Structure formats: structure tokens, C-alpha cells
Amino acid sequence: MRMQICVSGIAKKFYFEFDGEPEYLQEWWDDGLDVSVIVNEIPTWMPAGLVNLWCKVQDFFCKE
């Protein structure tokens, strides 16, 4: 499952994607890690008006 972790520096936040196991999520959250599950990925070239449709198509075809 694709996940993202947020690392906070002094002035900025950095986000890193990784493949993680969902059974560890609660343990990571309990330990204070800022980990999120990536539900949809949107390309930077995608026009804003198509984002909703793009996410619905991903949800339909990319079920775990």
C-alpha cells in the first residue's frame, strides 16, 4: 500500500512516499509519526476540472 510520511524541519515540511504495511499504521501513529495512506495520485499536468473524474476512475480500477 502506498503511504506518505511527513518529516518536519525548522522551516519546511518534507513528504516521502513508500510502500508500507497497513497493520503497522496504528503503531506508527501511536509513536507520533505523521503517516498517511495515499488514496489517489494526481499527475501535475491534470486540469483541475478532471481531478474528480480521475480519482473516481482510480477508485474503481485500483482497488486493493
Image: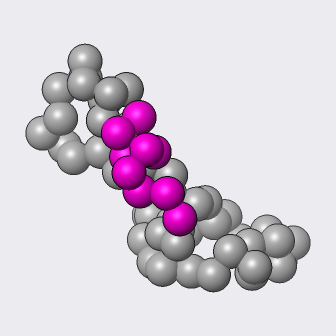
Q: Nearer the viewer, residue 13 or 57?
A: 57
Give the residue at the far right of this rendering.
30
User: Toward which corner of the image does residue 44 lie, by quadrant?
Assistant: top left
Residue 40 visible from this viewpoint: yes
| 62, above or below 7, in the image | above
| 22, above or below 42, in the image | below
Q: Image point 58% across, 60% down: which residue?
A: 37
Q: Nearer the viewer, residue 18 or 31?
A: 18
- Residue 39: where, in percent of width, then height? 50, 52
Residue 11 visible from this viewpoint: no
Q: Tell me the chief SS of the magenta region.
A: helix
Q: Is residue 52 magenta?
A: no
Q: Image point 30% across, 45% down: which residue?
A: 42
Q: Nearer the viewer, residue 19 or 13?
A: 19
- Residue 35: where, in percent of width, then height? 63, 66
Q: Nearer the viewer, residue 58 or 17?
A: 58
Q: Is residue 59 magenta?
A: yes
Q: Image point 53% across, 65% down: which residue?
A: 64
Q: Image point 33% across, 27% down: which residue?
A: 53
| 2, above or below 38, in the image | below
Position of 21 with respect to 42 (left or right) is right
Position of 47 with respect to 63 (left or right) is left
Give the residue at the far front of this rendering.
61
- Residue 49: where, in percent of width, then height? 25, 18
Q: How is the image coloured?
A: one colour
User: Toward which corner of the image does residue 34 lie, by quadrant?
Assistant: bottom right
| 34, above or below 60, in the image | below
- Residue 18: where, in percent of width, then height? 45, 78
Position of 11 with respect to 33 (left or right) is left
Residue interval drawn in magenta: 56-64
Position of 7 with respect to 46 (left or right) is right
